[in-house]
Image (cartoon, rainbow, N blue to C red):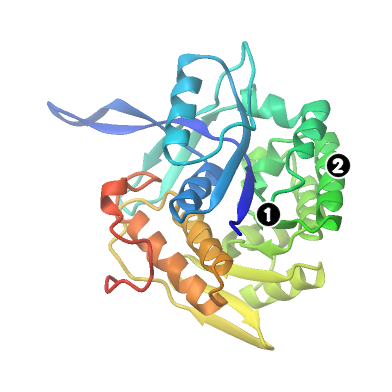
Amino acid sequence: MSISVAILGECMLELSNEESSIGNDNNLRKLSFGGDTLNTAIYLSRHDIDVSYVSALGLDSNSNWLIKNWEREGIDCSLVKRTPGLLPGLYMIDIDDKGERSFMYWRSSSAAREFFNNKALIEETFLALINFNYIYLSGITLAIMNKETRIILFRLLTNYKTKGGKVIFDSNYRPALWPDVKTAKEAYTDMYRLTNIALPTFEDEKELFSFESEKETVISLTKLGVEEVVIKLGVEGCMFFTNHEFVYIKSNLVDVVDTTAAGDSFNAAYLASRFSGLNQDEACKAGHFLAARVVQTKGAILPKSNLSSLSANSNES
């Protein structure tokens, strides 16, 4: 039986620096698209997982372009709400000499934000999600919702789990998207109580919850009821807890060009490996393998021509 995953989130139009044909003056901007959950959706689909994206767009030409690209990746877009008069969000990305990113956003009235703050639409959409094996979302998905719709989301996820569904959460904490730390902490705590598989980054958890170590993070999330936790540690790799033991898996050391989608791609390869029956150790290695390939090129999504294999069993390191 194939595994089905519904991924809830927002994908936006992306503007990034483009070299000019008359010199590298950074005066040109390249139009693309990106978003944490969409990046994971694409890489999961490339691992032959049945993925449906749950979001909203407008009826404009850019929205049509986004849908066309997602469907080319094998993503089911039947649950993407198309709303007249609304547009996709937009962000601009700058990358420094070390491959680290900074962002500027225009998303306050995006189609996705309007969708995730519409109580009736959230209720209606969840009727179509009840038969999916997994629901995946991130802290950014939570952040673009208001308190009322988050409460509805948590109620619907509770019902979904009683019927056998499982929930996957990547914390992806972005302080600028939250009104205050207290609100974010409450939302994340409620979310973790509903999560089966958590894939947080330690730096995010440290910033939000003031955890002093990745071990403390794992213990705290396990106490909230999370069954499977993998802590991403950046260049240091990742860590998980199994059989009463903390296990560290080193990352693949490569020359970093752009860290965009490093964590998103790791999540996809890890989950695809777990869905296929691999253990956590093997799944983490698969996650590092794909993430290492992603960070060696500009942009979140590798060209398909560069993907001779998505398997960590390749001789590549």
As drawn, the residue found furthest toward the front would be 1
Q: Nearer the viewer, residue 72 or 197?
A: 72
Residue in view at x 54 percent, y 67 percent: 276
Q: Quadrant of the C terminus?
A: bottom left
Q: Quadrant of the N terminus?
A: bottom right
Can I make out residue 5 in this image?
A: yes
Q: Nearer the viewer, residue 311 or 87?
A: 311
Up-down relation of residue 55 to residue 228 (above or below): above
When asked about the image quadrant of residue 32, the answer is: top left
User: Horizontal placement of 43 versus 122: left or right?
Assistant: left
User: Horizontal placement of 165 versus 206: left or right?
Assistant: right
User: Which numbered disc covers residue 186?
Assistant: none
Identify the residue position indicated by label 1 in the image: 134
Q: How many marks?
A: 2
Residue in view at x 72 percent, y 56 percent: 167
Amino acid residing under circle 2: Ile
When asked about the image quadrant of residue 88, the answer is: top right
Amino acid residing under circle 1: Tyr
Q: Where is residue 97? Give x, y as percent.
A: 30, 50
SS label for mark 1: strand
Q: Where is residue 150? Give x, y as percent.
A: 80, 41
User: Horizontal placement of 143 versus 68: left or right?
Assistant: right
Within 10 Å of disc 1 (Cα), the crowding (few <14, some 14-19, many 20+) is many
SS label for mark 2: helix
Q: Where is residue 279? Give x, y as percent.
A: 56, 77
